[in-house]
Image (spheres, rainbow, N blue to C red):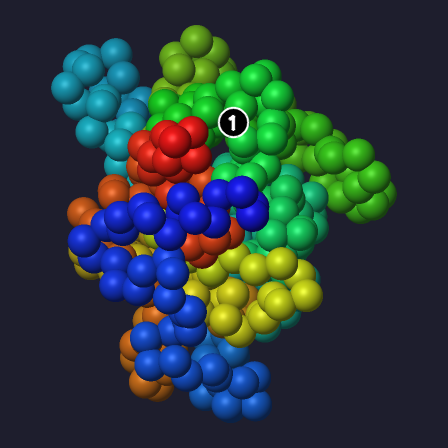
Amino acid sequence: MTQLDPVATSLPRSKKSSPLPTEKRTRGRNQKRWEASEWRPVIAKFLRPCPWRANWQAVSTLSLYVATWVALFFTAEISLWLTVPLVLLGGGLLVRVFIIFHDATHGSFYKSRTANEVIGGILGVLTFTPFKHWRGEHNVHHSTTGDLDRRGVGDIWTMTVREYLSSSKWRKLCYRVARNPIALFVIAPFVLFVVIHRFSRRGAPVDQRRSVLHTNLALLGLTCVMGSIFGFGTYIVLQLAIMGCAGAIGIWLFYMQHQFEDVYWEHHRDWDYTVAALEGSSFLRLPRILQWFSGNIGFHHIHHLSPRIPNYHLERCHYSHKMFSEVPVMTFWSSFASLRLRLWDETSRRLVSWSELRQMRRALAR
């Protein structure tokens, strides 16, 4: 992006940002690079799954989710005022169900591989997500987060300023639509969970393709059972409403965890796993009730540092060592500022908004 270097250095940063684009930046608040030999002993004691914690989390969450559907059965035909809060509750609980599913894909929820695959397969049906297929994609996400040369699998489409400016009008339009909040948080959940997850990606291994097929067959059976209880029209509307709510929350969480101004992006030759985990994933500090529904996934830096840590150990791991207090912190309200960010500027090494891009282009035209 050589042609934009003099422009980018003249751009104002947001008030909360400290280093200017012209400064040589050393990432990390205390400019400390933590090596694997330092952090692995710290997290070691949090890698062991706890059977009673896992069982309690699974039983309590699934019981509440089932109870919500039972309540919907009795209220769906009575009052919209009773149905809407239950749909919102169901959406929040489905997010928590997905977190357990997510842990199972990493083999961290239970110690037993078989137990993880069994509960993962069951919860994959409830979340409309094929267990083994999604596991394969998600593992790619963990191994490539923050790597500019390995984008495209399991992440939110992010272009650099240079890539965007050199793109065709059609590609620019597609990108703008894809990054629009309505597309991201309203349309994308339905497209992703209802449509995309029904098909395996090209080149997927046999076991992953079978996972998609088995999940689809199980969903067909679930739809027949629930449709016979609620009526097919009623069930489909309620299920889509709950899925839409849960999907919007889930994508919002994922977006905020990897899309903030000073997020870490590097080309592969300079990419570092530890820095990508601690600085390419935010610490999203949520109110306690939202932390419960989201299964502690706000401690996303810990999760990326070691996906084998169960969600019920993430908070304790975060507060166990000073290194974790140096990661980017985001609150529920401050997270919304990230919604304006659209492109990665390789010159200033930060995500920028459309308005900042316009400033670049005006300055370049002078």
Horizontal placement of 300 versus 221: left or right? left
Splitting the image into 4 quarters, where does residue 361 fall?
top left
Q: Can residue 28 be seen in this view?
A: yes
Instruction: Find disc 1 in the rendering and name its residue.
Output: 175
Q: Does residue 188 lie above or below 130 as drawn? A: above
Residue nearest the viewer, comparing 300 with 1: 1
Q: Residue at x 61, y 27 (%)?
A: 167
Instruction: Give the percent coordinates (x, y) of residue 129.
Output: 58, 38
Instruction: Give the percent coordinates (x, y) of residue 344.
Output: 47, 46
Residue nearest the viewer, comparing 346 with 117: 346
Residue nearest the viewer, comparing 313 with 123: 313
Q: Which residue is drawn at 17% across and 14% down?
A: 79
Instruction: Give the percent coordinates (x, y) of residue 21.
Output: 37, 58
Q: Can residue 230 be seen in this view?
A: no
Splitting the image into 4 quarters, where does residue 321 fall?
bottom left
Q: Does residue 90 lie above or below 135 as drawn? A: above
Residue lying at the far front in this picture: please name it: 366
Q: Residue at x 30, y 64 (%)?
A: 19
Splitting the image into 4 quarters, where does residue 212 fall?
top right
Quarter of the image with the C terminus in it: top left
Q: Which residue is drawn at 39% across and 26% down?
A: 180
Element class at badge 1:
helix
Instruction: Give the percent coordinates (x, y) of residue 268.
Output: 66, 61
Type of the residue with mark 1: Tyr
